[in-house]
Image (cartoon, coloured by chain):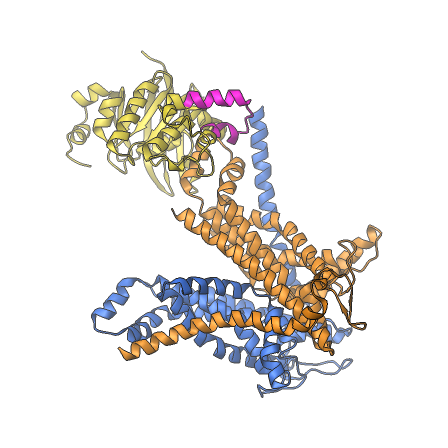
Amino acid sequence: MENKILKIEKFSAGYGNNYVLKGINLEIPEKKVTAIMGPSGCGKSTLIRCINRIHELNPDAIYKGHIYLNGEDIYRMNPTIVRRKIGMVFQRPNPFPTMSIYDNVIAGYTLNGIKLKRNEKDRIVEEALKKAFLWDEVKDVLHRKGTFLSGGQQQRLCIARALAMKPEILLLDEPTSALDPKATSRIEELIVELKETVTIVLVTHNISQAARVSDYTAFLYLGELMEFGPTERIFVAPKHKKTEEYLTGKFG
Amino acid sequence: MKSDSIFKAMLYTGGVIVALLVVFSFISLFRASWLSIRQFGLKFILSPVWNPVSEKFGALPFITGTLATSILALFISLPFSISIALLVGVYLPDGFLKNSLSYATDLLAGIPSIIYGFWGLFSLVPLMRKMEIKIGILPYGVGILTASIVLAIMIIPYTSSISREVISMVPEDIKEAGFALGATTREVIFKIILPYARSGIFAGILLAFGRAFGETMAVTMVIGNSNFMPKNIFSPANTMASVIANEFTEATKDIHLSSLIQIGLWLFIFTFLINLLGNIVVNKFRVESRK
Amino acid sequence: MRDNVRIIKDSLFKILVYSLAFLSIVPLLMIILQIVKNGASVITLKFFLRLPQPPGESGGGILNSLIGTFMLVILASTLAIPVGVATGIFLAEVKNKFTEFLGTLVNVLQGLPSIVVGILAYLWVVKPMGGFSAFSGAVALSIMMLPMIIKTTEETVRLIPFSLKEASFSLGANYTKTILKVIIPASAGGILSGIIIGISRIVGETAPLLFTAFGNPYVNLNPAKPVDALPLLIFNYAMSPYDEWHKIAWGTSLVLIVIVLGLNLLTKVAGKKWKTKF
């Protein structure tokens, strides 16, 4: 049995007086890809936004329960430290428009006020871009602004930016929903490659994407966790009726 | 249709009147300054002597006074206006506090300058006098620093409202990306928000500078009205606008009046350029951030 | 360790931002407080109904400047509103090189120092007419008001959905009728609040009146003769050496600030009510 890096216990969250997530219990295995699926509005994005404490940036945010990273309650840690250990890539690519490609990759360090030597920076940038399958495409234009890149390239730049911080967990919030099929398949290849070094939590509404890249799948419905288990088992023999209906396209 | 073309012509006329207004402003000012331009030439802006009795007119003391007060005012007001913009644009959630703060700054912008001047004369001047006695210099109370403080209070709403606008245009997702990398709010502000909003904030500063540059009443009441070159920031002085306000109705000689109008011409040219540049930068920023 | 330093810095910065922001409201409170404190005691009914008294005599009033300001505002609005509204519609409706240039000119006009506007009114009206007058003051104030009216008109008209115009055209209305009967009524609320903001701006203007309207210790209703105005009175009385006059200046400041803030409040509150919903 593999090590569980993240434990979510009786966790609820939402906005105003309205809980979108209700009493989630979930254990995320280390160095695997865990997909979180469900129809839109089921709370899957809210869930991963709670894992790196981005959710609370919204002034209406409410939450209760516990999330443990390696046994430590992240809601007792400082949020900036949590976020550095748990990287995130968003739905729409969002490179910093005022920074060059190089500065974007190293942004996690500059933002956190960490001073690095030139050659160290070069090494981190090269490593992260290589990991994100982007190095060959941008190695000659590192000091240009990242805004001229294609959508898929921008998204890989954002992945490189997150990887450069050497996070323990990488959260991907529907990372391919704004991309074309070709760019999507490159990101999917990348995800499979990356699980060698980092735990990945992937939110997707694309059922076949979950089937292609994930080892484990969690199915969320109306804010509750319906089912969790190895992806193969979920797809072949779902235990819950709602899961089956979702997977066979009966709704959503 | 005939009535349509008449109506359209009327709309055009409105536009043409406004355009002509600006053009004729320049022509009129230039013509009325001609006497003094011809007599003094470039020496007008370089000479430090302004003496209506001997009919020697050099505007350098006033140009110095204007630059000193407006630049000083800008520096004093900047930390405050940027703070308001950050508080409203970044820190405060929507709600009562945010609304009241925006509203209070709007009110601050609506108060007539004569009121600022009056308040400055009766409240700030005695305060400055006390301070000047304490540090052991001539206690005029009035002077460049006093005028700069009043000006600073007046321009806070301008810089802060433009900065607020540009800061609110910074896309939410790049701020989130910053937080997701573990940056603190301060780091997101300095490394993401301010660099993104840089040109817009610069334009706001420029427009506020333009306003401080031409402000008349508030300055006239607290600057001390001295026509000599100011020696330091406590010296009584005059700005370009305040010398016009003080001497225009008393100017009996043609050359005196023409020289005052020439100062007006320079004010016109300077503020024209500052506003032009400021508006170009703001518009460019608006277009770019909409992409 | 290093992270703690960052977190402390973050909190300190937050405290700094909060304190500086709230500190900048202090002058506003101080100004209003002081004006209310010093001004309230002189305000009686007589204050509004009497003329100024010579120094040394108490009980002077502001009737002349109250009427003067009222007259200046009416005259200036009459001059500025037609041109301003027409230009605003023109800018919103027509898109070419000239309107682009005109838009910039309007911004420049807005930034024009008020003292320069005073000089212009002096050159254009006072000199040809041979003397100071209410009319010359109104010309100066109308120039100050113009950009405000133009910009709000332009913005409001621009926000009117194209479908409204289409509907009017499809009913067979011509361009003139469409603008006059559909567009202007739909944007009336916005234009009106623009006019009120314009008035609130000019009602306190002093510099352009110094050598145009000039001031007058008596009530005058003739636009060709000088008049007094509230801000002019504040200036002249504040700079005088007499305590009695200072008191009157405080009272007048209170009146002026109530007018200005009242007008601002009116646009804020009523602006929402008048706004046409689409």
- Residue in front for this viewpoint, C178 or C195: C178
Task: Tell me, yes or no, whether the highlighted magenta stretch contains residue A115.
Answer: yes
Of all chains in the rendering, the one displayed in yellow is: A
Q: Quadrant of residue C215?
A: bottom right
Task: Tell me, yes or no, whether the highlighted magenta stretch contains residue A142.
Answer: no
Residue A160 versus residue B19 in the image, above or below: above
* Residue C266 visible at all: no
Secondary structure mainly formed by the magenta segment: helix
A49 horizontally vs C177: left or right: right
Over which residues does the magenta segment extend? A105-128
Q: Position of residue B184 (x, y in %)?
A: 51, 34
| Quadrant for the N terminus of chain B in the image | bottom left
Query: What color does chain B have in the rendering?
Result: orange
Q: Position of residue C162 (x, y in %)?
A: 29, 63
Q: Quadrant of residue B214?
A: bottom right
C201 horizontally vs B49: left or right: left
Task: Return the residue found at the far top.
Answer: A1
Q: How many marks?
A: 0
Residue under the point 65% across and 62% down: C31
Query: What color does chain C have in the rendering?
Result: blue
B246 horizontally vs A170: left or right: right
Q: Position of residue C73 (x, y in %)?
A: 54, 77
Q: Quadrant of residue A55?
A: top left
Q: Position of residue A2 (x, y in %)?
A: 33, 13
- Residue in front for this viewpoint, C164 or B15: B15
B277 horizontally vs A87: left or right: right
* Residue B258 visible at all: yes
